Image: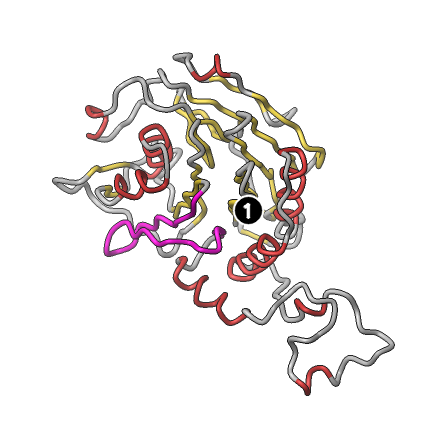
Amino acid sequence: MCTAVSFNKKPRLFGRNLDLDRRYAEEAVLMPRNFAYPYASDIKISIKKGGFALFGAATVIGGMPLFYEAVNEYGLFAAGLNFTESACLKDKESGKLNLAPHELIPFVLSSCKDLSEAKRLMQGVNLTHDSVSDEYPAARLHYFFADGGGSLAAEPLSEGLLLTPDPLEVLTNEPPLSFHLKHASMYRALSPSAAPDNLGKASRGAFTSDWVSLGLGAFGLPGDLSSPSRFLRAAFTKLYALEKPTEKEAVNQLFHILASVSMAEGTVRTDLGFEKTVYTSVLSSESLTYYYTTYGDPSIKPIRFSERDLTKNTLVRYPMFDTI
């Protein structure tokens, strides 16, 4: 259960909530231009050193970063979100760029400067069921890609990797983006209005003058923690949240947006326990900064990468948690 968002015009920022019922030793990781990613697929022969640098959160297995989300040095962002029911992973196909799910984010971000390049590249991609190891099976995900000019979802469905423009610049989990966009169209009447002007006459009659509240323009906005409801709430909040002129102000605003869809431990039960928002991140390619909060510490912590980090040939790694 996760939520990803693209926000603000300048500086452009990207963020996500990672909602899990377990931990995978998450770290903030920069993959520099000269890092040779150990691609397991047959596409590795066409990957050379010297790709674009990228940074985000990852679990590092045997020196290989498995990115949850990342942005590259040109401001192209990607995040993987759980898509367990609909994801259709395939055998390798001749004539396709066969990639394992964990390879898509580093491959696209190290190869493409913007969303249009990423879209062209992914039109030839076939996501396979190849995994990192028996301990880490192939992740069943769909992907949110964004830059300063727009967003799209990349979803491995039966017909192939479907690339769908995302005008709301938000993605959660199941079902596919096409459902979320159609569902959102039912809530067009919502607004930040102080009065219930968007309600029908019969509904307005239920609100007497002695208890009408600010915020009734959003009356009917779902408040549960399901993926469709989080999609709507994040889209509504992002749409009306004021953009900010400085990175400090915009980062703070995006953390507030993501807080509107965060998860308190105990509210969603799983077979292993309870989901919670393990971390919330905001990424800025402009300042090469990874901002994050954790469930146990809501203070915003910046990890600032440098231009020098971009040219190294080994991963730059920072722990995000005091204990794992």
In-image side of 225 versus 106 (left or right): right
Quadrant of image for the C terminus: top right
In-image side of 170 versus 91 (left or right): right
Please say if 111 is above or below 217: above
State which region is magenta.
Answer: 149-172
Amino acid type assigned to the residue bearing label 1 in the image: Leu
Circle 1 residue? 272
Front-most of residues 276 and 185: 185
Please say if 305 is above or below 81: above
Front-most of residues 31 and 14: 14
Front-most of residues 160 and 170: 170
Element assignment for label 1: loop
Q: Position of residue 186 (x, y in %)?
A: 51, 72
Q: Position of residue 26 (x, y in %)?
A: 53, 30
Q: Is residue 3 magenta?
A: no
Q: Residue at x 54, y 32 (%)?
A: 284
How many labels sit on residues?
Answer: 1
Front-most of residues 64 and 14: 14
- Main secondary structure type of the part rendered in magenta: strand
Q: Position of residue 323 (x, y in %)?
A: 64, 25
**Which quadrant of the figure has residue 15?**
top right
Q: Residue furthest bottom?
A: 202
In-image side of 196 versus 282 (left or right): right
Q: Is residue 157 magenta?
A: yes
Please say if 190 is above or below 315: below
Q: Residue furthest left?
A: 94
**Which quadrant of the figure has residue 124?**
top left
Color scheme of the displayed model: secondary structure
Query: Callout 1: 10 Å neighbours few (<14), some, many (20+)?
Result: few
Q: Position of residue 195 (x, y in %)?
A: 74, 72
